Amino acid sequence: MKPRPQIDWDITWLDEIASTSDAVLNAAKSGCREGTVIVARMQTRGRGRRGSAWQSPHGGLWCSLLLRPELKADELWGLTAAATLSAVEGVRKLTGLPVGIKWPNDIYIDGKKLGGIMAESSGGAAVVGIGLNANIRSADLPSVEWYPVTSLLVEAGKSVDLAALLDGILSELCERYRLLVEWGFSALLEEWRELSIVLGTRVRMECDGSVFKGTAVELNEQGGIIIRLQDGTRRGFEPRPGVSLGLEASERGRAKCP
């Protein structure tokens, strides 16, 4: 059995930075210890999944943290899952909002995106980036062609304490990180299923340039999602680059966390 990791968070708050993930990657190369966290009130060159630009205006929670898990490269997905679950639970406990997970790493409420999580590895270290639209007014939210965007301020009708939000997320992550290292992603699977907003809804899958439409029916122990296609057959999709899931426009109102 692997040892249960202990994390002593070392948090640095900045007003502005190009990318918190790039900064933590550099810190990892310099030998900084596990638990290093860099938080920015604004990013100028934030990065999302598949290298896409991540708009990070003032008022959001933009942070990255350094972990050094004893995980194989193909197990890194579990770290993304642990952080996504932790962010969802941190938001729910602080605000009471019924947020949930859109596979593979996005945080949604009522069909609208609140934020996302991204884990990447380098030289035995893992960097987890967390981006949440927190205290951002509706008029200042980024405009995205493919999905509606919202913020905690818009949904809750009041601002949140960013330090308290970060503290809650990190506290939640400690336990899920221990479970992941000790038992693997299977220890998080049931909670992931409970917080999923896509199971039972119609989705559009893009996989290496091909498009598949169907209904999301299951999540497997490797973090993949099973889709019942329109012809009745089932197909699994793994959480990897080149694979993405979109909610059909008619389903966005139904995509709510149970």
Image (cartoon, rainbow, N blue to C red):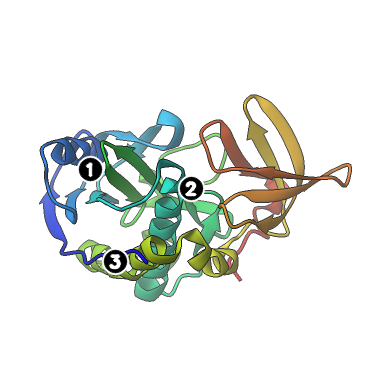
- The residue sitting at 25% across, 46% down in the picture is 58
Q: Nearer the viewer, mark 1 or mark 3?
A: 3
Kind of element beneath mark 1: loop
How many residues crowd mark 1 within 10 Å: few (<14), some (14–19), many (20+)?
A: many
Mark toward the start of the polypeptide (2 vs 1): 1
Residue 150 higher or lower than 211, as above or below: below
Mark whose residue sits in front, 3 or 2: 3
Q: CA distance from mark 2 to mark 1?
A: 18 Å
Marks 3/2: CA–CA distance: 40 Å
For badge 3, the amino acid type reads Pro
Nearer to me, 3 or 126: 3
Question: Which of pointers 3 and 2 lies earlier in the amino acid sequence?
Answer: 3
Q: Marks 3 and 1: in contact by CB < 8 Å?
A: no
Name which quarter of the figure residue 221 lies in: bottom right
The answer, for residue 25, to whether it is visible in the render is yes
Q: Please give the residue where the numbered disc 2 appears in the rendered image.
A: 149
- Residue positioned 60% across, 49% down in the render: 224
- Looking at the image, residue 78 sits to the left or right of residue 198; the answer is left
Amino acid under disc 1? Met
- Looking at the picture, tell me which residue is in the foreground, 229 or 184: 184
Residue, far right: 231
- Residue 159 in the image: state x and y as whole percent: 30, 64
| Marker disc for residue 158 | none
Q: Quadrant of residue 5?
A: bottom left
Task: State the residue position of label 1.
Answer: 42
Provide the residue designation for mark 3.
Answer: 3
Q: Residue at x 53, y 52 (%)?
A: 112
Left or right placement of residue 101 versus residue 13 in this view:
right
Q: Percent position (x, y) of residue 105? A: 48, 49
Mark 1 or mark 3: which comes first in sequence? 3
Q: Where residue 178 sits: x, y (%)?
A: 34, 67
Q: Position of residue 154 (x, y in %)?
A: 42, 59
